[in-house]
Image: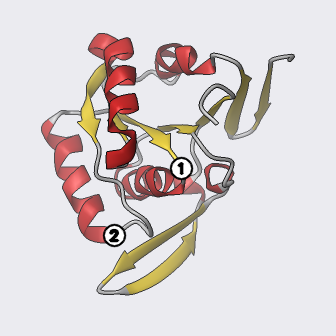
Amino acid sequence: MDSFVYQSQPQRIIFGTGTLAATGEELSRLGCRRALVLSTPQQAAGAEALAGDLGERCAGTFAKAAMHTPVGVTEEALAVVRAKNADAVVSLGGGSTTGLGKAIALRTDLPQIVIPTTYAGSEATPILGETAAGRKTTQRTPKVLPEVVLYDVELT
């Protein structure tokens, strides 16, 4: 299989085998030094492994992403972002984790790197869906479009 890099402003797409290893380099390219790695509870081991690979560039992990991006989960994650002085978020997983990263970016303007483990497509859109008080809302804003998407075929 041939690897490739595709960049269409303002989003950078990296696709190939083993691209997960480029996470640290992409954080540096964005000027980020302390990323919070996000995942669902089911992907927590992968998030911890990525955190270990990032070393000092990782502020910590938050493994509570949930379907439909509950606002309460976002608020909990924002508290961790602030407590850890994170300057970026890295979302490892499917749509739930991508949604959480987008919700954090909307509220903080922090850059995002998304590492999908499914090909759902949310990582390539400026759309965020959130749930509050049992009601789901969506919005479209360029503030939630991830700066970098790393597609690693070994994860999908």
Q: In terms of secondary structure, where does tag 2 sit?
A: loop
Classify mark 1: residues with Cα within 10 Å, few (<14), some (14-19) or many (20+): many
Q: Residue at x 37, y 46 (%)?
A: 42
Q: Position of residue 33 (x, y in %)?
A: 34, 20
Task: Tell me if residue 150 comes above or below residue 49 in the rendering.
Answer: below
Distance, label 1 to label 2, CA atoms, is: 15 Å
Residue 35 seen anywhere in this rendered image of the structure: no
Residue under label 2? 70
Task: Tell me if residue 151 comes above or below residue 49 in the rendering.
Answer: below
Which amino acid type corresponds to the residue marked 1 in the rendered image? Gly
Q: Residue at x 34, y 31 (%)?
A: 45
Q: Position of residue 78 (x, y in %)?
A: 24, 52
Residue farthest left in this picture: 83
Do the CB atoms of the residues marked 1 and 2 lie less than 8 Å apart?
A: no
Q: Quadrant of the C terminus?
A: top right
- Residue 48 is left or right of residue 113, and the answer is left
Q: Position of residue 29 (x, y in %)?
A: 54, 18
Residue 49 seen anywhere in this rendered image of the structure: yes
- Residue 156 is left or right of residue 34, and the answer is right
Which amino acid type corresponds to the residue marked 2 in the rendered image? Pro
Sequence-first disc among 1 and 2: 2
- Residue 34 is left or right of residue 137, and the answer is left
Q: Residue at x 63, y 16 (%)?
A: 18
Q: Residue at x 47, y 54 (%)?
A: 102
Residue under label 1? 94
Q: In terms of secondary structure, where does tag 1 sit?
A: loop
Q: Nearer the viewer, mark 1 or mark 2?
A: 1
Of residues 115 and 36, which is closer to you in this image?
Answer: 115
Q: Position of residue 35 (x, y in %)?
A: 34, 29
Q: Quadrant of residue 49?
A: top left
Q: Quadrant of the N terminus?
A: top right
